[in-house]
Image (spheres, rainbow, N blue to C red):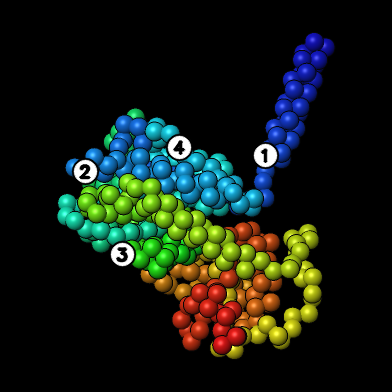
Amino acid sequence: MKTYNKFLLVLTVVILTFFYNTSSLAQTKTDKFVVVLDAGHGGKDPGRPTSYGWKEKDIALDVVLKVGKAVESNPNFEVIYTRKTDVFLELHERASIANKADADLFISIHCNAHNSQAYGTETYVLGVGNTERNFNVAKAENEVIYLEDNYEKHYEGFDPNSPDSFIGLTLMQEEYVEQSIMLANFIETNFKKDLKRKSRGVKQISLLVLRATYMPSVLIETGFITNHSEGKYLNSKKGQGEISNAIVKAILNYKKTLDMNVGDTVLIGGNTENNNSNVGTEDIYNNIVFKVQIAASSKKLEPKPYNFKGLDDVSREKINGLYKYYYGYTSNYTKVKQQQQTAKSKGYNSSFIVAFKDGQQITLEEALNSKAN
């Protein structure tokens, strides 16, 4: 009898704990767009060396705090920082913070360095194809793992000095590459057009801090700290203010573009219903084809329903070494928004609408604006 009573007591505690934790989680859930801001380096890791006395870890933190303050002023956003002070964080910890927050974006901010007076901005997304220059950048950024305890355990024997290690990186982020590139393009465009700075472009690279995040992620090289003129700009309040404003504008533009993909649809019992069930002809765009991108992977799958949770009308294209999988094919924007909701109801929560003109992919904004032209 005593054993039975003990069992009931334990069971009651377990049930109460479960409901308490569930309630707590429910209370902490948010409908806000969550952005994780990561100031590169910190603590015992100062970042790129420079003879001018500027420290990458300080500049990165100053820019991150300015970006965060501006984004936090928008009630639709929530900002989470990997660090707000001069502390050392391991690379896997930075990614873990973003993953635990179930973030919508991960943005890591750094300064570049070179043994010349090279200058300009670069924004990186995850990729395995490395030119010699990209490999050297990745090597320099990844070597911080040697400052970490038990780095062999956390990174499975990864060797920053070996090109083979980069080729062997698992692309956990493949599904988010397209969205990462979109954000990176917004950032570099703002640097180039708004700030009149030299943009060295958007590049794909094998960075450990990006590979373990489960959301669209970018790493921004805000300029070369080893260039006397650019380093002075990066270390100034004026420079940091302009850089942070350009990044904030890119984040808002990215969110706005995603919002353009949201239709007036309601999911009921896993099915898709449109508030206006009639798909009219007024949303037809001549010479434009809309599709819903549901996945991107290095794996080649047959575009059959059994490979895509029952979705039919799936197509596949190989672009830059990745297979991209699309659902639907229509010139009707209302219809493709319905198809996107269908894809999401099947579990493809990060699916998004893409547009093509004459067989070439264009931005969704260009496609929607084409009607007015």
Query: Foreground mark, 4 or 3?
Result: 3
The numbered mark, 2 or 1, whose residue comes first in the sequence reads 1
The numbered mark, 2 or 4, whose residue comes first in the sequence reads 2
Q: Quadrant of residue 192?
A: bottom left
The three-letter amino acid code for the residue at tag 2 is Tyr
Is residue 76 something that shows in the picture?
yes
Q: Residues within 10 Å of mark 2 (few under 14, many from 20)?
A: few
Asked if the residue under mark 1 is in contact with the one under mark 2, i.e. CB atoms within 8 Å, the reply is no
Q: Does dot 1 land on a helix, a strand or a loop?
A: helix
Question: How far across and how far down the image is residue 293, in percent?
Answer: 55, 69
User: In the drawing, what numbered circle is on residue 52?
Assistant: 2
Pick out the residue farthest to the top.
2
Asked if the residue under mark 2 is in contact with the one under mark 3, i.e. CB atoms within 8 Å, the reply is no
The numbered mark, 1 or 3, whose residue comes first in the sequence reads 1
Mark pair 2, 1: CA separation:
45 Å
Q: Which residue is mark 3?
A: 198
Q: Does dot 2 land on a helix, a strand or a loop?
A: loop
The numbered mark, 3 or 2, whose residue comes first in the sequence reads 2
Front residue of 265 and 224: 224
User: In the drawing, what numbered circle is on residue 28?
Assistant: 1
In the picture, measured across the screen, residue 285 lies left or right of residue 152, that is right
Mark pair 1, 4: CA separation:
21 Å
The three-letter amino acid code for the residue at tag 1 is Thr
The numbered mark, 4 or 3, whose residue comes first in the sequence reads 4
The numbered mark, 1 or 4, whose residue comes first in the sequence reads 1
Q: Which residue is mark 4?
A: 83
Task: Residue at 69%, 71% (x, y): give it.
Answer: 338
Query: Foreground mark, 3 or 2?
Result: 2
The three-letter amino acid code for the residue at tag 4 is Arg
Pick out the residue farthest to the front.
238
